[in-house]
Image (spheres, rainbow, N blue to C red):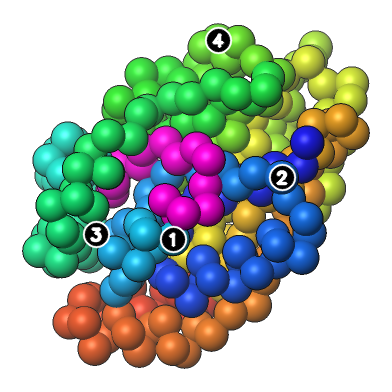
Amino acid sequence: MLYAILGDIHSNFEALEAVLAETKKAGVDEILSVGDVVGYAAEPGLCIKTMREVASIVVAGNHDYCVVNKTDIEYFNPEAKEAVLWTLKHLSQDESLYLSSLPLVIEKDNITLVHGSLHFPELFAYIRTFYDAELCFRGLKNEVCFVGHSHVPITIMRDSTIRAVTDPEVSLLKIPKAIINVGSVGQPRDRNPKAGYVLYDTEKKLVKFKRVEYDIVKASEKIIRAGLPTFNAERIRWGI
């Protein structure tokens, strides 16, 4: 089975459209998502509609839950808060119900999907240290856990020790447990503005981190025209 795992789309339809075109060329069997379909950018409704059509699994991100009042906006930075409030006004009732229905964790085919960490997933904690990773590993029943949230692609592996790599391809054949941060479709933060996602071949146990060029200028102009924070437009230009 060849999965494409997407995360942190953040209402950036140009990025999502480009990534989906690449997944089609790759011949993926299913598309999965680790959440945050909305937030920051200008086309939440179109991104929701598209993901409902193409993804077999979508788990909730903190932005998805915040726009439907299932998590506290006070934890958000000013630009994120403004985008949440803007998004709330631009969602239909059906779109809000969809986001509200998203689960925090899903397991499938020896894979676990969660937005932040399996350690109290409702808190949307970041995995930034090996200790954070260990807390997530303790809750991991399957071989691989796909996450998002930090917008930075990385593989964290645990065998006799915990270690992390940023290689574009990673074999998990001899790795008992791994956490894969799939990066971000719509707002990468690793100083590479190209849209990011992951391919995972369950037979080969091979992870491939993919980057895709898209019309960043068009996406950033939409953010500004919508009246969203200018910083949200600038950061997608620079991948920060």
Q: Are marks 2 and 3 in contact (CB under 8 Å)?
A: no
Compute the Cα span from label 3 to label 4. 31 Å
Q: Secondary structure at mark 1?
A: helix
Amino acid type of disc 3? Answer: Ala
Which residue, given by chain and number where applicable, does mark 1 sit on?
50
Which residue, given by chain and number where applicable, does mark 4 sit on?
138
Q: Which residues are magenta?
A: 51-64
Q: Is residue 14 left or right of residue 72?
A: right
Which residue, given by chain and number where applicable, does mark 2 sit on?
29
**Of the image marks 2 and 4, the number of the one nearer the N terminus:** 2
Q: Is residue 202 visible to the viewer in this orientation of the structure? A: yes
Query: Quick one: label 2, few (<14), some, or many (20+) residues within 10 Å?
Result: few
Q: Which mark is residue 127?
A: none
Amino acid type of disc 4? Answer: Arg
Compute the Cα span from label 1 to label 3. 22 Å
Q: Is residue 10 visible to the viewer in this orientation of the structure? A: no
Q: Position of residue 66 (x, y in %)?
A: 20, 44
| Rendered image quadrant of residue 225 | bottom left
Which residue, given by chain and number where applicable, does mark 3 sit on?
80
Measured along the vertical axis of the image, is residue 166 above or below residue 157?
below
Please report the residue visible at 65 percent of the width from the left and 69 percent of the height from the top: 21
Count every numbered label the image shows and give the total.
Answer: 4
Please report the residue visible at 71 percent of the width from the left and 45 percent of the height from the top: 29
Compute the Cα span from label 2 to label 1. 17 Å
